[in-house]
Amino acid sequence: MPPAATNNLGYTPPDGGWGWAVVFGAFISIGFSYAFPKSLTIYFKEIQMYFSVSYSEIAWVSSIMLAAMYAGGPVSSILVNRYGCRPVVIIGGLMVGASMVAASFGTTIIHLYLLVGVIGGFGLSFNLQPSLTIIGKYFQVKRPMANGLAMAGSPVFLSTLAPLNQFLFDNFGWRGAFMILGAIVMNCCVAGALMRPVNMKTVQKHPVTASKGTTAKKAGSTENNANPEAGDLLTETEQKQKIGGCADKLMDLSLFKHRGFIIYLIGNVVMFFGFFAPVVFLPSYAKGIGIDNYQAAFLLSIFAFVDMFARPGTGLIANTKWIRPRIQYFFSFSVAYNGVCHLLCPFLAGYLGYAGLVVYALFFGVAFGMVCALLFEVLMDLVGAQRFSSAVGLVTILECGPVLLGPPISGFLVDVFDDYKYMYWACGVMMLAPGIFLFIMNYFNYKQLDQEERERQSGAIGMQSVKQSVAEEAEAREKEMKMTKDEEMAEGTGD
């Protein structure tokens, strides 16, 4: 297993203690952030009939919520650096809970767009970003395990919320269910209360000796060698200076000149057009072919259960010495694997019915978990930890478009063809194409990186030879001067 990345926090993270309570809080917060928009799809068919809207119009609810969650990432990051993780998560929980309660009184679909989509989405972004950030402050050696446990909250909550939402709808209707969900999601406030800052009195402090030049050199080495272990975390002072100067430069726009980042960005923007829609419409697809409501909701539980184990499993595989040096290929495969699953889904549903959808949910759960486990790891592998925050901000902003438009476009295809299979085929193409693109472009990128590394090593050897020659010449000159001085002293003594 690769060694733990060095940190530049100015202290040694406790790697345990209250940190496990923080992981539990992050588990809750991340679970709601990722699972909540997907689980609401249980109500789509009934809300669609209630407001007399089309499939594409109702799909805007979850897509706006996801897009707002992505768009709020940079804002959440600034708030975290200014006020800390705990208050931001608490405010996010209050926003989501209040938006769901208010939405239960909505009278038009526009009300759901604004309340559930915009306000609820920004609340989820305030839950997600601090949860990812604070784990790095409490863990160093055990950070991969802590992150894996926290990220498992998404499938665990999805497998729980899917049947719960069906139960709430059957007993209270969609309005009553929204009000109850608003109360449930306010548990994010409890999760935020667990995220107290690191107690500096109980941790071992150490001086930060690395200079800016050394840090920059490490970051550059990370970018060129695609080594995820080389980047260092910023100290609190550096973070405050960075945020304080945000008026001059909010983000590192020089990333748009980074070859690997551009490849990653193009592939991900295309991929996200077909990433969420298959999950959003899976229960509705099942209901459309005559499956009852509970069995349709159970498909999401199957999907989430498999996803729950696929994420840590993928992390373990990606951390091996065989996969880690070429992890971009593994990510490319996982994206293409998603596309193949979507292309085969209509055939499985057509020939095997509900059993075919169960098989699809199993394989799709593995594929989805693989992408989610690798999504941010491969980005850090490309740009390094020093530039990771800027890279995430730029990626999430640009991904808002496909996240927002993907499900409505998919719903439009359902409206036009009155069949879900064309939507799944379209999503399959939108996943398979970027998977192949990423594989091919990463091959050339790795090839170019290897060539640059060879040139760098040759240059280093040449520079070392020059330095050695200069040193030998200086040593010879010093010896000559010493001999001359000795001769002069000898002549003076003879006189």
Image (cartoon, helix red, strand yellow):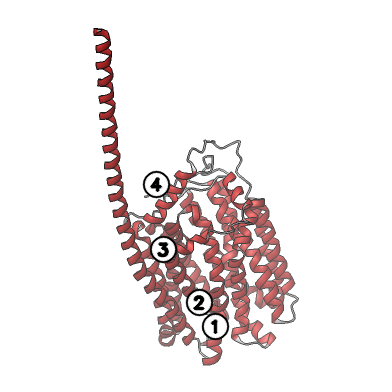
Residue, x 56% and y 86% (percent of image)?
412
Between the residue at mark 1 and the residue at mark 4, the CA separation in whole angstroms equals 44 Å
Name which residue type carries label 2.
Phe
Secondary structure category for the residue under label 1: helix
Residue at image mark 3: 260
Q: Amino acid at mark 4?
A: Pro
Instruction: Tell me if residue 312 can be seen.
Output: no
Residue at 34% across, 59% down: 449
Q: CA distance from mark 4 to mark 3?
A: 24 Å
Secondary structure, mark 3, is: helix
Q: Which circle's residue, 2 or 4, is located before the other in the chain?
A: 4
Q: Amino acid at mark 1?
A: Ile
For the C terminus, the image quarter is top left
Q: Is residue 299 visible?
A: yes
Q: Residue at x 52, y 79 (%)?
A: 282
Image point (40%, 87%), residue name: 351
**Which mark, by number, is residue 273?**
2
Q: Nearer the viewer, mark 4 or mark 3?
A: 3
Question: Which residue is the site of mark 4?
Answer: 3
**Residue in front for this viewpoint, 259 or 441:** 259
In primary-sequence order, the first of circles 4 and 3 is 4
231 to 399, vertically: above or below: above
What is the tally of numbered marks visible in this picture?
4
* Rendered image: mark on residue 409: 1
Q: Residues within 10 Å of mark 3 (few under 14, many from 20)?
A: many
- The earlier-in-sequence mark between 1 and 2 is 2
Q: Picture coordinates of residue 47 (x, y %)?
A: 66, 82
Front-most of residues 183 and 112:
112
Q: CA distance from mark 2 to mark 4?
A: 36 Å
For this orientation, the residue located farthest to the bottom is 417
Residue 301: x, y in percent?
Answer: 52, 71
Cα separation between marks 1 and 2: 9 Å
